[in-house]
Each structure stands twice: as structure tokens, then as C-alpha cells.
Image (spheres, grey):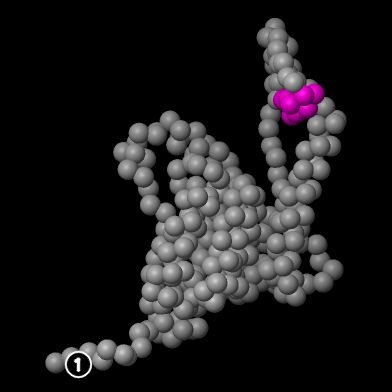
Amino acid sequence: MKIRLPFRKKPPLVAVIRLSGVIATGGRGQLNDASLAPVIEKAFAKGKPDAVALVLNSPGGSPVQSSLIAARIRRLAQEKDVPVYGFVEDVAASGGYWLACAADEIYVDESSIVGSIGVISASFGFHELMSRQGIERRVYTAGKDKSMLDPFRPAREDDVVRIKDLQRQIHDAFIAHVKTRRGDKLPEGEDLFTGEIWVGAKSVETGLADGIGHVVPVMKAKFGDKVRFRAYGQKKGLLSRFGAQAVQAALGQVEDRALWARFGL
């Protein structure tokens, strides 16, 4: 016969938030602040967790959404006084690493890809093809820069200068975020912000991660063998589960695959 003690302390609880996918606004299966807000808020509040673990698998995406998600995690961590641990699976690159830096400690697998602290913009140019086909492009704007980076006309030097300046501003914000979160863990005199990537133990050597480890054994080492886990993640909408948005989803998946492919995944 078991005797229940009403005031017996429960084993430590770790809330596990899965952040898997491309970071972007609106697409199915993508990570953005609007869809993740209720998940993150619940993870920090329900059951008064002793820690929050972020399980990360993202090739990046929107810098704004990366910033919003990471800021929400940091705000709640401070308000609730809860430590945050990050665990990288296949990749936490670009915006994915931005999210990883929301954790107080970052752990990776031996084969995890980490880094890509940079900003990229890619497009195509079709002006020569249009010329060969006898197609005339007609664009009317109010504002001389309204059609900046139009892929249907030759690239303009002023446009390239302008987009690079915009990228520099975003890159500076990214670098500031990493330096703020990683602090003196980063080696002096080494430029880690070129867009380069590192794998496993090498990312630990560079200070971008704290160790090799997976969520369960690391959390057990920190909170004991009886630690409890409660998982949180995004739920698929009813329409998307039944394929009502199949065309939009297919187009989104093409863009997503291009981002994953940059890291051989």
C-alpha cells in the first residue's frame, strides 16, 4: 500500500521546446514568433520548470523572426529565473545559431553544423533571356528606387551598394547578439563572423558551443536521474494536415530545401 505524502517535493522538471525548420513568416512547418509564442510561453510557465531545453535544427531564415523568438526566450528566462540549455541536432546555422544563442549553454552532436554568422541575399537575372526572346519589360514607379534589384533588368551598381549596406547593418546586429550571449567564451583575435561553419568539437573549440552532448544525458547529469521531461512544439493546423494548402506548401518547401541544401542536408 502506497502512502502519498502531500508535501513531498517532485523531481526536477525540464521543459523541452523543439525548434525545427526554416525561420520565416507564415509557411507551414516554419518557425516564427507568432506561431511559437504560445508554445514558448507555456513551456516556461506550466509546472514551474527547473530548466528549459531548446532542441534546435534550423538552417536559418528571417533575421527579424530569429531576433523576435530569441528575445522572447530571453525575456521569459529572466522573468521566471529559469536557465536555458540549447541542443543542436543536424544544424544550427545563420538564424538557427541566433536561436541557439538564446540558451545559456549550447551543446552539439559530434556531427552538428554550427555557425554561418552572416547575411545572404540571392536572386536571378533574366534581362538577357528577355532580350533574346523579344520581351519588353515595362515598369512604372513613383520613387526612383522602388524597383531596386529588379531581376528583369541589368544589375545597377547603386543597387548592389545599397543591398550590401543593408546586409552590413543586419550582420552587425547578429554579431552583437552573439557577442552579448557568448561573451568571454569567444577567443580573442579570431574572426568567427565571416559566414564560415564548424562541425561538432570544432565548434566547441571556437567557443560557439559549450560541449558535446544530447538533451537527456546532459539534463540528467545536471538535475539527477529522476529528472522529468515535458515536450512542447508547434501543432499542425487542421487544413494543412488534410492538404488544403498543398500548392502553397509545395512552393514553400522548394525554398526551404534550398536553405537546407546549403549545409548538405
Q: Nearer the viewer, residue 143 or 175?
A: 143
Please name the predominant secondary structure of the magenta segment in the image: loop
On-image quarter of the N terminus: bottom left
Callout 1: 10 Å neighbours few (<14), some, many (20+)? Answer: few
Q: Viewed as shown, does residue 122 lie left or right of 14?
A: right
Where 104 sits versus 10, above or below? above
Where 246 sits versus 53, above or below? above
Where is residue 72 shown, x and y percent of the image?
56, 61
Find the residue positioned furthest to the left: 1
Q: Can residue 2 be seen in this view?
A: yes
- Is residue 2 magenta-colored? no
Secondary structure at numbered mark 1: loop
Q: Viewed as shown, does residue 65 lie left or right of 218?
A: right
Where is residue 234 shown, x and y percent of the image?
42, 54
Residue at x 61%, y 47% (from the top left corner): 62
Residue at x 63%, y 49% (from the top left corner): 64
Where is residue 70 shown, x and y percent of the image?
59, 60
**Amino acid marked by disc 1:** Ile
Residue at x 40%, y 84% (from the top left corner): 225
Where 210 sits versus 246, above or below? below
Q: What residue would you read off at disc 1?
A: 3
Q: Is residue 260 visible?
A: no
- The magenta-colored residue range is 143-150
The quadrant in which residue 226 appears is: bottom left
The quadrant in which residue 191 appears is: bottom right
Where 8 sits versus 113, above or below? below
Residue at x 45%, y 36% (from the top left corner): 249
Q: Viewed as shown, does residue 129 lie left or right of 220?
A: right
- Is residue 144 magenta-colored? yes
